[in-house]
Amino acid sequence: EAVFPKPQRTRRIAVANQKGGVGKTTSTVNMAAAMANKGSQVLVIDMDPQGNASTALGVPHASGDPSVYDVIEGRAGLGDVLSVCPDFPTLDVVPASIDLSGAELEVADLPNRNTLLKDALDLYLRQSDKHYDYVFIDCPPSLGLLVINAMCAVTEMLIPIQAEYYALEGLGQLINTIGLVQEHFNPVLLVSTMLVTMFDRRTLLSREVYNEVKGHYPSIVLDTTIPRSVKISEAPSFSQSVIAYDPRGIGAISYGEAALEIAKRSQQVLDAIEARRNK
Ligand code: ADP
Ligand code: MG
């Protein structure tokens, strides 16, 4: 079995695409679980008021439960609200609940409204005894303040792209927003990874979409694609990642391979981020 390398520094990755239903949450939780399953220390921060990542990782997130909402509102630190994923002892989860849907308006007038999550994450990583190899942030399907907070808190973006006819529609707008964040708040931010999801190897369309995305972003798109799989879509209803729910199935294998590909590119990505920092 291939060795699963650890990055030399913490990789902070926001999983974003303003389109809904492209596999952001599914990729966040299964990538994180696949990494944790290989012994990496992983933190998932759920920034979507829907709380789907929290559900899929089996952590409580009812309205009123401690969550990232309390962190954004400045009432708690990340360490105060995180839970450990029941299936993986090295996977911590900061849950989100529906309460978070009020946050964008409530913090809109704060001068530091864009960096509330970054400031909380920096503080937590500095003060905690824990070292994380990966921090993943699951974003809601928008380009609003919660997503800007995620983009400011990380050094990398992972963009899931659904293998369907309109796959690249809206990508320009997302890249534009990332450009604005780079310009105004976070110059080191790197689009490090694109992952084609819900790939159907029987259809020409899936291959065409893959080739088109790969043609536009040759060094960013992972070789691994995630196939459509019923087990992947079922797993959240059992409050589990597919890595725990169906460890030998095609979904777990594919996310395992994608995670390995991301892990193997760590040095190259960290060097590229460092180059941006020194620019
Ligand atoms: P997003 O977070 O971008 O809105 P999700 O990850 O929630 O998207 O995925 C949207 C829907 O598609 C969910 O019902 C999910 O279970 C399903 N889904 C995601 N990836 C796959 C896949 N590879 N195979 C089958 N169903 C999938
Ligand atoms: Mg989602």
Image: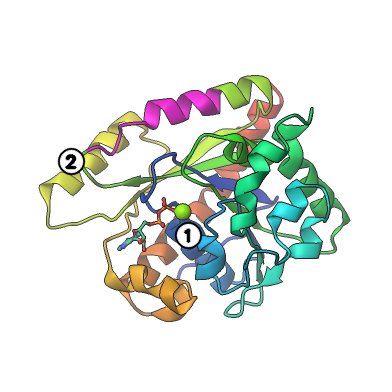
For residue 199, above or below residue 35: above
**What SS does tag 1 mark?**
helix
**What SS does tag 2 mark?**
helix
227 lies left or right of 194: left
Residue 264 in picture, x, y percent from top left: 51, 54
Residue at (24%, 37%) from the top-left corner?
A: 166
The quarter of the picture where residue 173 lies is top left
The amino acid on which the numbered mark 1 sits, given as a three-letter code, is Ala
Query: Would you say the residues marked 2 and 1 are in contact, meaning their CB atoms lie under 8 Å apart?
Result: no
- Say which of 209 and 115 sits in front: 115
140 lies left or right of 10: left
The image quadrant in which ligand 1 is located: bottom left
Residue 274 in picture, x, y percent from top left: 67, 33
Residue at (85%, 64%) from the top-left corner?
A: 129
Residue 176 is covered by the magenta coloring = yes
Q: Which residue is mark 1?
A: 259
Residue stretch in magenta: 166-179
The amino acid on which the numbered mark 2 sits, given as a three-letter code, is Glu
For residue 119, above or below residue 84: above
Look at the image and tell me in which quarter the C terminus lies. Answer: top right
Look at the image and tell me in which quarter the N terminus lies. Answer: bottom left
Residue at (42%, 75%) from the top-left corner?
A: 237
Residue 83 is covered by the magenta coloring = no
Helix, strand or loop for the magenta stretch, by majority: helix
Q: Which residue is mark 2?
A: 208
- The reply to whether residue 2 is visible in this rendering is yes
The quarter of the picture where residue 92 lies is bottom right
Residue at (85%, 51%) from the top-left corner?
A: 126
